[in-house]
Image (spheres, grey):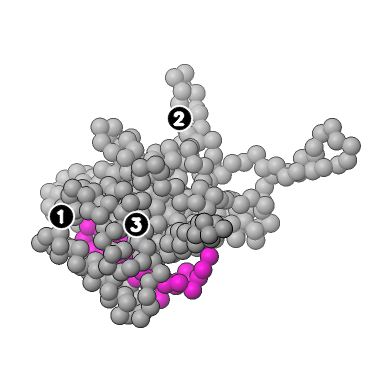
Amino acid sequence: MNKAKTVYVLDAGGTGFKFSAVREGKEIIEPFTIPASGSNLDEVLQKMIDGFSAILQHTNATPAAISFCFPGPADYENGVIGDLENLPHFRGGIALKAMLENHFHCPVYINNDGDLFTYGEALGGLLPEINHLLEQQGNPKRYKNLIGVTLGTGFGGGIVLDGVLLRGDNSAGGEINRLRNMLYPRTSAEDSISIRGIKRVFAREAGIDPAACPDPFGIYEIAMGRKDGDQKAALKAWDELAQVLADAIANAVSLIDGLVVIGGGLAGAWPVFIEPLVRYMNTPFHDLQGKAVDRLEIKTFNLQDSSDLIAFTEKTGVMVRVPKTSREVWLWYDPIKKTGVGISKLGTSSAVAIGAYAYAIDQLDRAAVSRTLELG
């Protein structure tokens, strides 16, 4: 990987465009945000161009690539953004990648925010930190797969398998928000795992007009007993999020079998939802005869809890002898299958920036190898 190159990055949302620049795996400027709203498409696109141009003024470094996340639906590979609820001017399909490549004369890579968040945490956040703790404990186990989820205005996700970002055949890999809502089966998980979900449940339980509902941080403060309000209603709001989130993550873990990292604006409220989240993930099913069946083949640990973290990382298992051999051969065997759920170690925006940088450098290196092979 060529670490000397500068990559311009952007975390694009419905309300703001947050710009930064990364070199050698670290942000080299203080990120800055430009409001995403505009009266027409041309104004919004110009804001993006102005933002990247401002990075050049801050760094005086020509970009080797531009790499950023943008909300879906989109054809990320070709860089065409589709119909967006929070950015209505993009309806009908906008060739954003080609426009920016033409303007800045460098490769442009666009991904989903959940994808880049997970990629950043897989390379420099939760995944390497846990593997380092395993090594310190003398535990030979190492984790290679990571499921990332972001909780905020919406519910996003991403998947890294053995160091490779899963994009999918239709740029729709890791779209965990489309899983069914276990509490309200006619809708999606996102209706409960989002800012609107927290506010809806609190207003319902507190018996207040939704317009008078505090913001999620206020509901968190009430749940923690640090602010006056209906604490029972606040705890119920976060508990409903935990139930639906646990079901969604458990479904993903059943298929992917990896660690789980949580980011996004609502992740800061983890002290009120992560313990019930892990408990729900470990709560068994019951078959039609009433017999308890493990919800997962894997036991889930709370990586934010010190005792759970020690239990997760400590060396367990035994050495087993290979039978019917002329010499003694022993192998390590651990029958306990584990996954863990933790909160972002980098911070969501930094994880997105690092993921965007790493993805761009990887693509540039691949292109360089391809050119070398072609020249033969």
Give the residue at mark 2.
Answer: 285
Residue at 22% across, 53% down = 94
> Residue beneath label 1, please?
89
Predominant SS along the magenta part: strand
Q: Is residue 11 above or below residue 164?
A: below
At label 3, counting other C-alpha atoms closer than 10 Å, the crowd grade (few under 14, some 14-19, many 20 or more) is many
Q: Which residues are magenta?
A: 1-28
Mark 3 or mark 1: whose residue is earlier in sequence: 1
Residue 259 in view in this figure = no
Question: How far across and down, in percent of the image, does residue 112 sit?
Answer: 34, 53
* 170 drawn magenta: no
State left or right for residue 183 relative to residue 341: left
CA gap, disc 2 and disc 3: 40 Å
Q: Which residue occupies 16% across, 45% down?
A: 207
Label 2's element? strand
Q: Disc 3 designates what residue?
A: 110
